[in-house]
Image: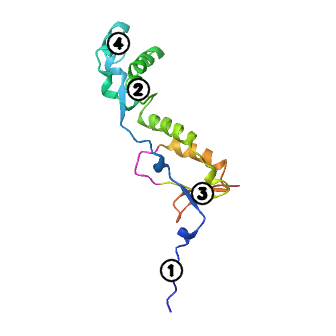
Amino acid sequence: MKEEIVNRVANSALMTFDLEDHFPEGQRAEIDLSQWLHAGLILREKEFRAALKSIDWSIYKDQYIALYCSTDAIIPAWGYTLVCSSLLPFAKKVVLGCEEDLNSSLYQDILNALDYSAYQDKAVILKGCSEKAVPLAAYLMAMEKLQAVAKKVMYGESCSAVPLFKR
């Protein structure tokens, strides 16, 4: 008589929290301010303002934007702020940094708005592998939220989870 194979993982009380399920969809763009600097290094106000006025900012409509400078230029705060001001009527969100910084900021907004009551006093696996660009910071933010409510938090997959926290 054959013994029936039982999927213990499927029958367990483990809950999975998958950051990829909350990945903020939408088009992203990185804008390098060095393109508007003299020799890529010096912000000359008159030329900088003229360059910004010549841009059709509507091409960034409904996009998430990361502002950065690829050179060692020292850009005053008003420089980034002026570019941001030009983008705000069109972009969904503007952040300082690279695309990973942008995704971290988007995740912070999303994770702060979630209801974690379903994970109250439960064993939770913070799913590790993802195909989308989930930033490391999002895992830290999720851990902060889950540890506040869960009985146990693990990282990885059901078949090979690494224990992180136990109340």
Q: Is 9 one of the magenta-colored residues? A: no
Task: Return the disc, 3 or 4, that comes first in the chain's sequence.
Answer: 4
Q: Which mark is residue 124?
A: 3
Q: Label 1 belongs to which residue?
A: 5
Q: Amino acid at mark 1?
A: Ile
Q: Earlier in the sequence, mark 1 or mark 3?
A: 1
User: Cα distance, mark 2 to mark 3?
Assistant: 37 Å
Q: Return the x and y of residue 77 as percentages of the image width and height.
A: 48, 16
Does 8 sit above or below residue 55? below
At label 3, the amino acid type is Val
Q: Secondary structure at mark 1?
A: loop
Q: Which residues are magenta?
A: 129-134
User: Is residue 78 or residue 92 the one in the foreground?
Assistant: 92
Task: Identify which amino acid the numbered label 2 is placed on.
Answer: Tyr
Looking at the image, which residue is at 45% across and 38% down?
103
Residue lying farthest to the bottom in this orientation? 1
Instruction: Find the distance from the CA under tag 2 to the CA under tag 4.
Output: 15 Å
Find disc 2 in the rendering and name its residue.
68
- Structural distance between the alpha carbons of marks 2 and 1: 55 Å
Secondary structure under tag 2 reads strand
